[in-house]
Amino acid sequence: MSHTHSRSRTHSRAPEPVASEHIPLKARDVSFSWEDTPLHWLPNDPFTTHTINVLHLLLPAGERWFVHVYKQVLPYIRDERLREDVIGFIGQEAMHSQAHDEVLPHLKERGLDPTPYTAQVDWLFEKLLGDRTLPPGRARRWWLMERVAMIAAIEHYTAFLGDWVLNATELDHRGADPTMLDLLRWHGAEEVEHRSVAFDLFLHVDGGYRRRVRTWATAFTALVFLWQRGARFFMENDPTLVDGRASFKEFHRSGRAGTLPTTGAMVRSIPRYLSRGYHPSQEGSTAQAVAYLASSPAATAAEKAAAGQRGV
């Protein structure tokens, strides 16, 4: 990963936040126009296009679930700055969910109906990972803490992907659609910006190491399964492809070409998360994220609109 600091290899057992990486969070009310974006927004590369497109299938339901769980955990927060961070995180995640949701009708217009897949993803988050009818008390709290830990593990990967896409210059070299690139980088920058919140919340309300390892295994397995399934779904249902297939070999090849994260970088991120001294602020760069958000067409348009409403 391009901005991993050496501190992430520390032997200290207690997580050490990097104070300079903390920033107050705000949701940006962005909007994107999709009518000029082609189905294969990375020219001549349907596999990379569709592998990244899986984000539009997973994130709306996933981020709605984050918001739902965090609203339930707010009463457990006894630290005012963390509470503000969590409220900022909720605002950003709700916006991410909406922005990715708006890509789905565009895909449908291009002949690729994502509904069969999104129905399965909705079931996963709403039923399997939803509120179970547990008695109040220990069982209900256990399930809430389990989900808080799971979100911290997932956020490790969203921050990893955010950092990757901010630095994925190969996508620019290959002529990626600028609107899609801005959506991915605006979202990626905000993931880097708020990368410590989910982990800090987990440490604050629970922080058990065994729970961290167990929920990481669940989250990682689910993400790999859903992602390869989503890429396969898109490739097989793309109306422009005769025999569309998705494979790990193709994923590995695209990673080496720079259009997707490398397999090696993803594997190396595992021991970092499982290290007892891990803290998300040791990875990625808030300054880089903030710099992108200051130049992002969607984020700057949202800022101007907000300033206009305030009468600035």
Image: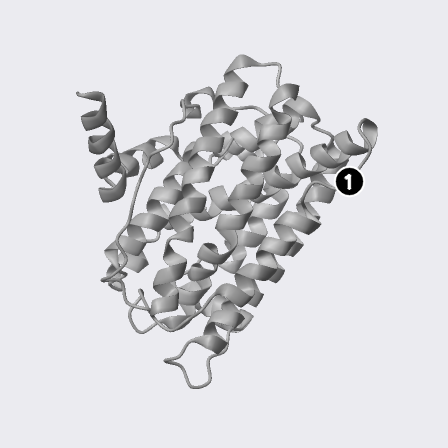
Q: Is residue 285 above or below residue 237?
A: above
Q: Where residue 241 sits: x, y (%)?
A: 40, 81
**Of residues 215 and 252, the one drawn nearer to the viewer in this rendering:** 215
Identify the residue at image location x=77%, y=40%: 133
Q: Quadrant of the C terminus?
A: top left
Q: Where residue 101 sits: x, y (%)?
A: 42, 52
From the viewer's perspective, tell me whether residue 299 is left or right of residue 197. Answer: left
Q: Is residue 186 above or below residue 45?
A: above
**Of residues 73 and 271, the one drawn nearer to the viewer in this rendering:** 73
What colour scheme governs how the chains and residues are painted in the rendered image of this protein?
Answer: one colour
Q: Is residue 20 above or below residue 168?
A: above
Please tell me whether mark 1 sits on a helix, a strand or a loop: loop
Using a 10 Å C-alpha cutoff, classify the residue at mark 1 as few (fewer than 14 neighbours), some (14 to 19) or many (20 or more).
Answer: few
**Of residues 5 and 132, the one drawn nearer to the viewer in this rendering:** 132
Amino acid type shown at disc 1: Thr
Identify the residue at image location x=58%, y=26%: 200
Q: Circle 1 is placed at which residue position?
A: 133
**Of residues 290 and 14, the one drawn nearer to the viewer in this rendering:** 290
Classify residue 121 by image quadrant. Answer: bottom right
